[in-house]
Image (cartoon, helix red, strand yellow):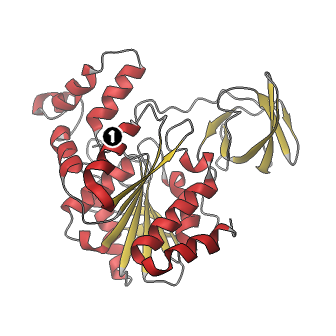
Amino acid sequence: MPGYNRRYEIAPLVVTDEEIEFQTTKRTSSPGIFGLHVSGEDEPATIGPVIFQTEHVVRRRLLRKPAWLSTESKCRWSGIVASTPDSPFRDVKISTSLGPAPAWLVENDSNGWAIHVHGQGSDRSQTLRGVTSATALGLNSLIVSYRNDGDGPRSTDGLSHLGESEWHDLEGALHFVAERGATRCIIFGWSLGATIALNVLQRSGLSSLVTGIVMVSPVLSWQAVLRANANHQGWPRILGTYVTSLLGLKGISRAAGLSEPLRIRKADAARLSTPLRTPVLILHNKNDWSVPFQISREFAQRQGPRVELVEFDCSGHTQEWNSDPIGWDLAVRRWYGGFLQPERAGDKAEATAGEL
Protein backbone atom coordinates (compact mmCIF):
# COMPACT_ATOMS: atom_id res chain seq x y z
CA MET A 1 0.00 0.00 0.00
CA PRO A 2 1.39 3.44 -0.82
CA GLY A 3 2.44 5.19 2.36
CA TYR A 4 3.33 1.98 4.20
CA ASN A 5 6.72 1.98 5.96
CA ARG A 6 8.49 0.50 8.95
CA ARG A 7 10.29 3.26 10.79
CA TYR A 8 11.39 2.48 14.32
CA GLU A 9 11.31 6.00 15.69
CA ILE A 10 9.56 5.64 19.06
CA ALA A 11 11.44 5.13 22.32
CA PRO A 12 9.52 4.55 25.59
CA LEU A 13 10.34 7.01 28.38
CA VAL A 14 9.30 4.67 31.21
CA VAL A 15 8.49 0.94 31.20
CA THR A 16 7.05 -1.00 34.15
CA ASP A 17 5.25 -4.33 34.26
CA GLU A 18 1.86 -2.65 33.89
CA GLU A 19 2.44 0.82 32.45
CA ILE A 20 4.43 2.59 29.74
CA GLU A 21 5.14 6.26 29.00
CA PHE A 22 5.88 8.04 25.73
CA GLN A 23 6.31 11.53 24.45
CA THR A 24 2.86 12.81 23.52
CA THR A 25 2.17 12.55 19.79
CA LYS A 26 -0.95 12.00 17.72
CA ARG A 27 -0.17 8.28 17.59
CA THR A 28 0.90 7.64 21.16
CA SER A 29 -2.15 9.46 22.52
CA SER A 30 -4.70 7.80 20.21
CA PRO A 31 -7.51 6.09 22.17
CA GLY A 32 -7.72 2.33 21.94
CA ILE A 33 -5.43 -0.70 21.87
CA PHE A 34 -2.28 -0.87 19.73
CA GLY A 35 0.84 -2.89 19.06
CA LEU A 36 4.35 -1.64 19.82
CA HIS A 37 6.87 -3.47 17.65
CA VAL A 38 10.50 -3.58 18.75
CA SER A 39 13.21 -3.60 16.10
CA GLY A 40 14.62 -7.09 15.65
CA GLU A 41 11.85 -8.88 17.60
CA ASP A 42 8.76 -10.72 16.41
CA GLU A 43 6.27 -10.41 19.28
CA PRO A 44 4.89 -6.90 19.85
CA ALA A 45 3.97 -5.33 23.14
CA THR A 46 0.24 -4.62 23.49
CA ILE A 47 -0.47 -1.03 24.47
CA GLY A 48 -3.75 -0.34 26.26
CA PRO A 49 -5.81 2.76 27.09
CA VAL A 50 -4.43 6.13 28.12
CA ILE A 51 -4.16 6.54 31.89
CA PHE A 52 -2.71 10.02 32.13
CA GLN A 53 -1.67 12.65 29.62
CA THR A 54 -0.07 16.07 29.52
CA GLU A 55 1.10 18.16 26.61
CA HIS A 56 4.46 16.39 26.70
CA VAL A 57 3.93 12.92 28.23
CA VAL A 58 1.31 10.19 27.87
CA ARG A 59 1.05 7.17 30.17
CA ARG A 60 -0.81 4.05 29.01
CA ARG A 61 -1.64 0.55 30.24
CA LEU A 62 0.83 -2.12 29.16
CA LEU A 63 -1.37 -5.14 28.44
CA ARG A 64 1.37 -7.43 27.22
CA LYS A 65 5.07 -6.81 27.94
CA PRO A 66 7.70 -8.81 26.02
CA ALA A 67 10.81 -9.52 28.08
CA TRP A 68 13.01 -7.44 25.78
CA LEU A 69 10.99 -4.20 25.98
CA SER A 70 12.87 -1.37 27.72
CA THR A 71 13.60 2.35 27.45
CA GLU A 72 16.47 1.39 25.13
CA SER A 73 14.12 -0.22 22.60
CA LYS A 74 13.58 1.32 19.18
CA CYS A 75 9.91 0.83 18.39
CA ARG A 76 7.18 1.47 15.87
CA TRP A 77 3.47 2.01 16.50
CA SER A 78 1.08 -0.35 14.73
CA GLY A 79 -2.47 -1.63 14.62
CA ILE A 80 -1.08 -5.18 14.69
CA VAL A 81 -1.27 -6.41 18.30
CA ALA A 82 -0.03 -10.02 18.02
CA SER A 83 2.30 -12.08 15.84
CA THR A 84 0.39 -15.39 16.04
CA PRO A 85 -3.20 -16.36 17.00
CA ASP A 86 -4.10 -16.24 20.70
CA SER A 87 -6.21 -19.40 20.33
CA PRO A 88 -4.63 -22.83 19.76
CA PHE A 89 -3.68 -23.14 16.10
CA ARG A 90 -1.70 -25.26 13.72
CA ASP A 91 0.32 -24.53 10.59
CA VAL A 92 -1.13 -25.76 7.31
CA LYS A 93 -0.33 -25.33 3.62
CA ILE A 94 -2.75 -24.11 0.94
CA SER A 95 -2.20 -25.47 -2.56
CA THR A 96 -1.84 -22.76 -5.22
CA SER A 97 -0.67 -22.72 -8.83
CA LEU A 98 2.66 -21.29 -7.66
CA GLY A 99 3.21 -23.75 -4.83
CA PRO A 100 2.12 -24.06 -1.19
CA ALA A 101 1.04 -20.95 0.72
CA PRO A 102 1.47 -21.13 4.53
CA ALA A 103 -1.63 -20.54 6.66
CA TRP A 104 -2.71 -20.77 10.29
CA LEU A 105 -5.73 -22.87 11.15
CA VAL A 106 -7.83 -22.17 14.27
CA GLU A 107 -10.38 -24.98 14.55
CA ASN A 108 -13.77 -24.61 16.19
CA ASP A 109 -15.50 -27.93 15.34
CA SER A 110 -17.85 -26.29 12.86
CA ASN A 111 -18.99 -26.45 9.23
CA GLY A 112 -18.78 -22.67 9.13
CA TRP A 113 -15.50 -21.02 8.20
CA ALA A 114 -13.84 -17.63 8.15
CA ILE A 115 -10.90 -16.93 5.83
CA HIS A 116 -8.80 -13.93 6.85
CA VAL A 117 -6.92 -12.09 4.08
CA HIS A 118 -4.37 -9.36 4.86
CA GLY A 119 -3.50 -6.23 2.93
CA GLN A 120 -0.52 -5.07 0.92
CA GLY A 121 2.72 -4.39 2.78
CA SER A 122 1.52 -6.48 5.72
CA ASP A 123 1.26 -10.17 6.60
CA ARG A 124 -1.09 -12.67 8.23
CA SER A 125 -0.73 -11.05 11.65
CA GLN A 126 -2.68 -8.01 10.41
CA THR A 127 -5.91 -10.00 10.36
CA LEU A 128 -5.62 -11.57 13.83
CA ARG A 129 -7.78 -8.79 15.27
CA GLY A 130 -10.76 -10.37 13.50
CA VAL A 131 -10.11 -13.97 14.49
CA THR A 132 -11.53 -13.57 18.00
CA SER A 133 -14.84 -12.37 16.53
CA ALA A 134 -14.95 -15.28 14.09
CA THR A 135 -14.25 -17.75 16.89
CA ALA A 136 -17.04 -16.23 18.99
CA LEU A 137 -19.40 -16.79 16.04
CA GLY A 138 -18.52 -20.49 16.08
CA LEU A 139 -16.43 -20.38 12.90
CA ASN A 140 -13.18 -22.11 12.09
CA SER A 141 -10.55 -19.58 10.99
CA LEU A 142 -8.05 -19.94 8.17
CA ILE A 143 -5.50 -17.12 8.21
CA VAL A 144 -3.83 -17.15 4.82
CA SER A 145 -0.80 -15.87 2.96
CA TYR A 146 -0.66 -15.29 -0.78
CA ARG A 147 1.85 -14.80 -3.56
CA ASN A 148 4.63 -12.24 -3.06
CA ASP A 149 3.61 -11.25 0.48
CA GLY A 150 6.82 -12.55 2.07
CA ASP A 151 5.27 -15.81 3.31
CA GLY A 152 3.43 -17.11 0.26
CA PRO A 153 4.96 -18.43 -2.96
CA ARG A 154 6.81 -16.08 -5.27
CA SER A 155 5.70 -15.33 -8.82
CA THR A 156 8.18 -14.73 -11.63
CA ASP A 157 8.16 -10.95 -11.09
CA GLY A 158 7.85 -11.03 -7.29
CA LEU A 159 5.53 -8.00 -7.34
CA SER A 160 2.05 -7.20 -6.13
CA HIS A 161 -0.61 -7.40 -8.83
CA LEU A 162 -3.09 -5.40 -6.72
CA GLY A 163 -5.45 -8.37 -6.47
CA GLU A 164 -5.43 -9.27 -10.16
CA SER A 165 -3.55 -12.53 -9.64
CA GLU A 166 -3.65 -12.91 -5.85
CA TRP A 167 -7.31 -13.90 -5.93
CA HIS A 168 -6.29 -17.30 -7.32
CA ASP A 169 -4.57 -18.05 -4.00
CA LEU A 170 -7.73 -17.18 -2.07
CA GLU A 171 -9.57 -19.54 -4.40
CA GLY A 172 -7.08 -22.18 -3.25
CA ALA A 173 -8.11 -21.43 0.34
CA LEU A 174 -11.76 -21.97 -0.63
CA HIS A 175 -10.80 -25.37 -2.05
CA PHE A 176 -9.09 -26.12 1.28
CA VAL A 177 -12.18 -25.39 3.38
CA ALA A 178 -14.55 -27.06 0.88
CA GLU A 179 -12.53 -30.27 1.16
CA ARG A 180 -13.06 -30.10 4.94
CA GLY A 181 -16.83 -29.90 4.75
CA ALA A 182 -17.43 -26.15 4.75
CA THR A 183 -21.07 -25.26 4.18
CA ARG A 184 -20.60 -21.51 4.54
CA CYS A 185 -17.60 -19.21 4.51
CA ILE A 186 -17.12 -15.60 5.57
CA ILE A 187 -14.12 -13.76 4.14
CA PHE A 188 -12.53 -11.10 6.33
CA GLY A 189 -10.61 -8.92 3.86
CA TRP A 190 -8.32 -6.15 5.07
CA SER A 191 -7.52 -3.37 2.57
CA LEU A 192 -6.12 -5.21 -0.48
CA GLY A 193 -7.56 -8.35 1.11
CA ALA A 194 -11.02 -6.89 0.42
CA THR A 195 -10.07 -6.36 -3.24
CA ILE A 196 -9.00 -10.00 -3.42
CA ALA A 197 -12.25 -11.13 -1.77
CA LEU A 198 -14.44 -9.23 -4.24
CA ASN A 199 -12.38 -10.54 -7.15
CA VAL A 200 -13.04 -14.10 -5.94
CA LEU A 201 -16.74 -13.33 -5.60
CA GLN A 202 -16.88 -12.08 -9.19
CA ARG A 203 -14.48 -14.51 -10.87
CA SER A 204 -14.22 -17.82 -9.00
CA GLY A 205 -16.18 -20.99 -9.66
CA LEU A 206 -16.30 -21.44 -5.87
CA SER A 207 -17.95 -18.08 -5.21
CA SER A 208 -21.19 -19.77 -4.09
CA LEU A 209 -19.35 -20.98 -0.99
CA VAL A 210 -18.83 -17.34 0.10
CA THR A 211 -21.87 -16.40 2.19
CA GLY A 212 -20.59 -13.03 3.36
CA ILE A 213 -17.63 -10.65 3.33
CA VAL A 214 -16.35 -8.39 6.11
CA MET A 215 -14.25 -5.65 4.52
CA VAL A 216 -11.91 -3.54 6.66
CA SER A 217 -10.67 -0.28 5.09
CA PRO A 218 -11.37 -1.86 1.69
CA VAL A 219 -9.61 -0.96 -1.54
CA LEU A 220 -12.58 -0.81 -3.88
CA SER A 221 -10.93 1.48 -6.44
CA TRP A 222 -7.17 1.49 -6.99
CA GLN A 223 -7.51 4.64 -9.06
CA ALA A 224 -9.06 6.44 -6.08
CA VAL A 225 -6.34 5.09 -3.76
CA LEU A 226 -3.51 6.15 -6.05
CA ARG A 227 -5.07 9.59 -6.53
CA ALA A 228 -5.41 10.03 -2.76
CA ASN A 229 -1.83 8.96 -2.12
CA ALA A 230 -0.51 11.26 -4.85
CA ASN A 231 -2.37 14.14 -3.21
CA HIS A 232 -0.95 13.21 0.22
CA GLN A 233 2.57 13.36 -1.21
CA GLY A 234 1.91 16.82 -2.65
CA TRP A 235 1.62 15.63 -6.25
CA PRO A 236 -1.31 16.24 -8.64
CA ARG A 237 -4.16 13.76 -8.17
CA ILE A 238 -4.24 13.13 -11.91
CA LEU A 239 -0.96 11.25 -11.50
CA GLY A 240 -2.89 8.40 -9.86
CA THR A 241 -5.17 8.18 -12.89
CA TYR A 242 -2.18 8.09 -15.24
CA VAL A 243 -0.57 5.27 -13.26
CA THR A 244 -3.66 3.07 -13.39
CA SER A 245 -3.87 3.60 -17.15
CA LEU A 246 -0.16 3.05 -17.81
CA LEU A 247 -0.04 -0.23 -15.87
CA GLY A 248 -2.48 -1.65 -18.40
CA LEU A 249 -0.03 -1.06 -21.27
CA LYS A 250 2.23 -3.98 -22.15
CA GLY A 251 5.41 -1.95 -22.64
CA ILE A 252 4.98 0.17 -19.53
CA SER A 253 4.05 -2.76 -17.30
CA ARG A 254 7.10 -4.69 -18.53
CA ALA A 255 9.33 -1.69 -17.82
CA ALA A 256 7.89 -1.62 -14.28
CA GLY A 257 8.98 -5.24 -13.83
CA LEU A 258 5.51 -6.76 -14.07
CA SER A 259 5.08 -10.08 -15.84
CA GLU A 260 1.78 -8.95 -17.36
CA PRO A 261 -0.26 -5.75 -17.75
CA LEU A 262 -2.69 -4.89 -14.94
CA ARG A 263 -6.11 -3.82 -16.21
CA ILE A 264 -6.77 -1.84 -13.06
CA ARG A 265 -9.38 0.57 -14.37
CA LYS A 266 -11.44 -2.27 -15.82
CA ALA A 267 -11.20 -4.22 -12.55
CA ASP A 268 -12.15 -1.13 -10.53
CA ALA A 269 -15.22 -0.58 -12.69
CA ALA A 270 -16.34 -4.18 -12.25
CA ARG A 271 -15.95 -4.08 -8.46
CA LEU A 272 -17.81 -0.80 -8.14
CA SER A 273 -20.68 -1.49 -10.52
CA THR A 274 -21.45 -5.22 -10.40
CA PRO A 275 -24.56 -5.81 -8.24
CA LEU A 276 -23.87 -7.99 -5.21
CA ARG A 277 -26.00 -10.89 -4.05
CA THR A 278 -23.71 -11.67 -1.13
CA PRO A 279 -24.06 -9.68 2.12
CA VAL A 280 -21.12 -7.37 2.84
CA LEU A 281 -20.12 -5.48 5.98
CA ILE A 282 -17.72 -2.56 5.56
CA LEU A 283 -15.81 -1.25 8.59
CA HIS A 284 -14.01 1.94 7.63
CA ASN A 285 -12.44 4.98 9.28
CA LYS A 286 -13.85 8.21 7.85
CA ASN A 287 -10.43 9.89 8.27
CA ASP A 288 -8.53 7.30 6.19
CA TRP A 289 -6.45 9.41 3.79
CA SER A 290 -4.80 6.38 2.15
CA VAL A 291 -7.96 4.51 1.13
CA PRO A 292 -10.75 7.10 0.81
CA PHE A 293 -13.80 6.50 2.99
CA GLN A 294 -16.00 8.25 0.43
CA ILE A 295 -15.57 5.35 -2.00
CA SER A 296 -16.89 2.94 0.65
CA ARG A 297 -19.88 5.22 1.27
CA GLU A 298 -20.70 5.49 -2.43
CA PHE A 299 -20.29 1.74 -2.89
CA ALA A 300 -22.68 1.00 -0.01
CA GLN A 301 -25.24 3.49 -1.33
CA ARG A 302 -25.04 2.03 -4.83
CA GLN A 303 -25.33 -1.59 -3.68
CA GLY A 304 -28.27 -0.99 -1.35
CA PRO A 305 -29.32 -3.23 1.56
CA ARG A 306 -26.83 -6.00 0.75
CA VAL A 307 -24.00 -3.75 1.95
CA GLU A 308 -23.83 -2.34 5.48
CA LEU A 309 -21.31 0.41 6.24
CA VAL A 310 -20.14 1.05 9.80
CA GLU A 311 -18.20 4.29 10.18
CA PHE A 312 -15.34 4.78 12.64
CA ASP A 313 -13.84 8.08 13.76
CA CYS A 314 -10.15 7.42 14.29
CA SER A 315 -6.80 7.89 12.58
CA GLY A 316 -4.73 5.41 10.63
CA HIS A 317 -5.46 2.89 7.91
CA THR A 318 -6.96 -0.47 9.08
CA GLN A 319 -7.05 0.74 12.69
CA GLU A 320 -10.81 0.67 13.18
CA TRP A 321 -10.58 -2.30 15.57
CA ASN A 322 -7.81 -0.61 17.53
CA SER A 323 -9.86 2.51 18.16
CA ASP A 324 -12.95 0.61 19.33
CA PRO A 325 -12.48 -3.18 19.62
CA ILE A 326 -15.81 -3.69 21.38
CA GLY A 327 -17.74 -1.68 18.78
CA TRP A 328 -15.91 -3.47 15.96
CA ASP A 329 -16.71 -6.90 17.37
CA LEU A 330 -20.34 -6.03 18.11
CA ALA A 331 -20.82 -4.71 14.55
CA VAL A 332 -19.54 -7.99 13.13
CA ARG A 333 -21.74 -10.11 15.42
CA ARG A 334 -24.89 -8.09 14.71
CA TRP A 335 -24.29 -8.21 10.94
CA TYR A 336 -23.60 -11.95 11.01
CA GLY A 337 -26.64 -12.68 13.14
CA GLY A 338 -28.80 -10.45 10.99
CA PHE A 339 -28.22 -12.24 7.69
CA LEU A 340 -27.65 -15.83 8.85
CA GLN A 341 -29.85 -15.97 11.94
CA PRO A 342 -32.31 -13.08 11.61
CA GLU A 343 -34.73 -14.39 14.21
CA ARG A 344 -31.94 -14.41 16.84
CA ALA A 345 -29.96 -11.34 15.79
CA GLY A 346 -31.30 -8.95 18.40
CA ASP A 347 -31.05 -11.40 21.30
CA LYS A 348 -27.56 -12.49 20.26
CA ALA A 349 -26.22 -8.95 20.05
CA GLU A 350 -27.54 -8.10 23.50
CA ALA A 351 -26.32 -11.32 25.07
CA THR A 352 -22.78 -11.07 23.69
CA ALA A 353 -22.29 -7.37 24.41
CA GLY A 354 -21.86 -8.12 28.09
CA GLU A 355 -19.15 -10.69 27.36
CA LEU A 356 -16.81 -8.12 25.84
* Foreground residue among 261 and 280: 280
Q: Position of residue 22 (x, y in %)?
A: 78, 30
Which residue is situated farthest in the left direction here?
250
The answer to whether residue 167 is above or below residue 239 is: below
Q: Quadrant of the C terminus?
A: bottom right
Residue drawn at x 42%, y 47% as measured from the top left = 119
x and y, in percent, of residue 103 in the image? 46, 64
Left or right: 178 in relation to 14: left
Q: Residue at x 70, y 33 (%)?
A: 28
Q: Residue placed at 53% from the left, 78% from the top?
A: 138
Q: Nearer the viewer, residue 252 or 316?
A: 316
Q: Crowding near pointer 1: few (<14 within 10 Å), some, many (20+)?
A: some
Residue under pointer 1: 295
Q: Quadrant of residue 307?
A: bottom left
Q: Secondary structure at mark 1?
A: helix
Front residue of 222/294: it is 294
Identity, as a three-letter code, of the amino acid under mark 1: Ile
